[in-house]
Image (tube, rainbow, N blue to C red):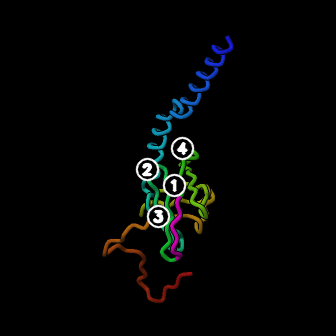
Amino acid sequence: MPCANEMFGLLRLLSVGLAYLTGTPDHLAQRRDLAEAWQVLSPCAETASFDGAWTLSLKDNGTAIAKSDRHAQLLQGRWELVDAGTHTFRIDVLAFGNDFVVVPTAAGCVLGSGTLRNVDLRQSWFTHGSREAGDLMASATDPGVRTK
């Protein structure tokens, strides 16, 4: 009898280990959630830092890469959905780990560091779309006009 009990215990242990290795049943749901999150995040797939020294590339598989030619660095990390209702994501790339909210704009999007009510622009990321020739950026008809 002790041999049968040991065999039963071994089979239970093997089945638990096999279940752990093959993943949880909600693995398909996690992939679907990642795909839905990517639909919101994808307009911000290629962004630049406030000072232009860094670029951030996000991929649909949850990876994130921050690159700086100026500092000769390449940092790899991950992104994940924090809150679908507020379009908040956590992007964790070594020195840039933070929560970001996707803010759509006419020129692309902003990954705002913080919340919609409180965004730190210096720690945010901005799309860097190309401007077509003839786009009006700013204009002043009176040469005596000054801005602050």
User: Which span is picked out in magenta?
Assistant: 71-76
Q: x%, y% of residue 19? A: 54, 29
Question: How busy is the neighbourhood of tag 4: few (under 14 within 10 Å), some, or many (20 plus)?
Answer: few
User: How much space separates mark 1 and mark 2, taking CA atoms?
Assistant: 15 Å
Give the residue number, with chain letter if any, for mark 2. 60
User: How much space separates mark 2 and mark 4, taking CA atoms?
Assistant: 16 Å
**Given the current orientation, which residue lies at the most extreme top position?**
1
Of label 2 and label 4, which has the lower sequence position?
2
Check the picture and name the quadrant holding the N terminus: top right
In this rendering, position of residue 16 left or right of residue 43? right
User: How much space separates mark 1 and mark 3, taking CA atoms?
Assistant: 12 Å
Q: Is residue 67 magenta?
A: no
Check the picture and name the quadrant holding the C terminus: bottom right
Give the residue number, with chain letter if any, for mark 3. 47
Q: x%, y% of residue 24? A: 54, 32
- Give the structural element (helix, strand or loop) at label 2: loop
Inspect the image, locate mark 2, and give the three-letter code of the amino acid beneath it. Answer: Asp
Q: x%, y% of residue 79? A: 53, 52
Inspect the image, locate mark 3, and give the three-letter code of the amino acid beneath it. Answer: Thr
Of label 1 and label 4, which has the lower sequence position?
4
Q: Is residue 75 magenta?
A: yes
Above or below for 100 versus 28: below
- Give the structural element (helix, strand or loop) at label 3: strand
User: How much space separates mark 2 and mark 3, taking CA atoms?
Assistant: 15 Å
Residue depicted at 55% across the width and 51% down the height = 89
**Given the current orientation, which residue lies at the most extreme left position?**
133
Give the residue number, with chain letter if any, for mark 4. 84
Of label 2 and label 3, which has the lower sequence position?
3
Give the residue number, with chain letter if any, for mark 1. 102
Above or below for 1 versus 98: above
